[in-house]
Amino acid sequence: QDVAQRAFTGGLPSKTRVNEVLAEAHARYAPHNDGVVADYIPILAEADPSMFGLSLVGVNGHTHQVGDAEIAFSIQSISKAFVFALVCEAIGHNAVHDRVGVNNTGLPFNSVMALELHDGSPMNPMVNAGAIATTAMMPATSGEERWQLIRNGLSRFAGRELMLDGEVYRSESLTNQRNHAIAKLLDSYDRLDANAEDTVDVYTRQCALAVTAQDLAVMGATLADGGVNPITGEQVVSAEVSRDTLAVLASCGMYERSGEWLFEIGLPAKSGVAGGIVAISPGKGALGTYSPPLDEAGNSVRGQRACAYLSRALGLNLF
Ligand code: DON
């Protein structure tokens, strides 16, 4: 069965073949050195640009990895996808849809103009404004409780207890005036359900959770598996919430590049400025990639190339 056909009939190639293809992708893109490591969060500028890890976890629980797949980095914006799922699970599809929205802004992830252009609507939960609004919607009586619920929820997606990278948290906390401005602006439009400063603090913590490419693949595979973590067997969110999350990732996960990404790679995905990407193939599994140098939209360059190669070679593309 050729890969194009497999894209429609389901199933990953054999374990051996997946390992071979992952190794091919790693060897092919390891020499590429385009892109620039993020530096607007000072500590991220210290990342080693040569780090390159790939992981794939199938809904059958098989795990595959090559390169720096066990190196820890901060999850950053990839947290937005899983917090969105947890909040949908807690308060329902309609509440999130009405309050945050699900359309692409067509503008950068930290755009203030996008908010002003749409009467203060954050537009979608994958840009900073929408993610901050979504974090504020997590039912809790304090910022601390909200943070623990988020950390616990993301840990269930990963199948292990995720820890805060304190250095990343402190570095971003000292330089995140823009996110504070976005939260205040949301508040001024009456679109924030919790205290602005507390919410930015929780959001900054969720972005500073340390993960590996392997963790991202397990987290993504949980969404690919209708909300069931294929390693632990735990139902983390419902199948309906997994579908809602994948739909938003398809339209907004790669920011203003989401259309191009879907056209070329054909998978719901989410990137983070520390260099991670998770790309999900529903019913099959998920890729987790790590490579710090980014393009101008804030997406890992080698991660995108590796996902494009793997999507084709493994028949992961949805279409
Ligand atoms: O809020 C921020 O700017 C960062 N904590 C996360 C941004 C991010 O990861 C954008 N992604 N590519």
Image (tube, rainbow, N blue to C red):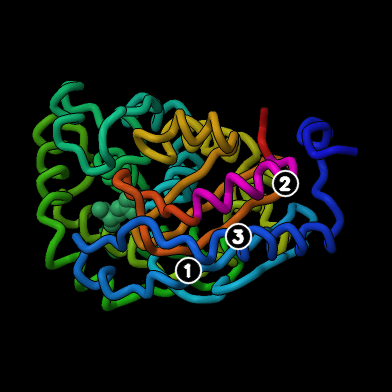
Q: Is residue 233 left or right of residue 75?
A: right
Of pointers 3 and 2, the one earlier in the residue sequence: 3
Q: What type is the residue that disc 3 sits on?
A: Arg
Judge whether residue 309 is colored magenta. yes
40 lies above or below 223: below
Q: CA distance from mark 2 to mark 1?
A: 26 Å
Observer able to see residue 87: yes
Which residue, given by chain and number where applicable, does mark 3 sit on?
28
**Residue mark closest to the camera, 2 vs 1:** 2
- Our reading of the magenta stretch's main secondary structure is helix
Residue 280 locus on image (x, y percent): 61, 45
Pointer 2 with pointer 1, Cβ within 8 A = no
The dot on residue 313 is: 2
Residue 4's image quarter? top right
Q: Dot 1 corresponds to which residue?
A: 211
Mark 1 lies on a secondary structure that is strand
Magenta stretch bounds: 303-316
Between 146 and 180, which is closer to the camera in this rendering?
A: 180
Q: Secondary structure at mark 2?
A: helix
Q: CA distance from mark 3 to mark 2?
A: 13 Å
Closer mark to the observer between disc 3 and disc 1: 3
The image shows residue 29, relative to residue 5, as above or below, that is below
Quarter of the image containing the N terminus?
Answer: top right
- Marks 3,1: beta carbons within 8 A: no
State the residue in front, 88 or 257: 257
| Mark 1 neighbour class, 10 Å CA radius: few under 14, some 14 to 19, many 20 or more | many
Amino acid, disc 2? Ala
Disc 3 and disc 2 in contact, CB within 8 angstroms: no
Image coordinates of residue 283 in percent, x first then y, are: 73, 42
**How far is the residue under mark 3 from the one under mark 1?**
24 Å
Quadrant that contains the C terminus: top right
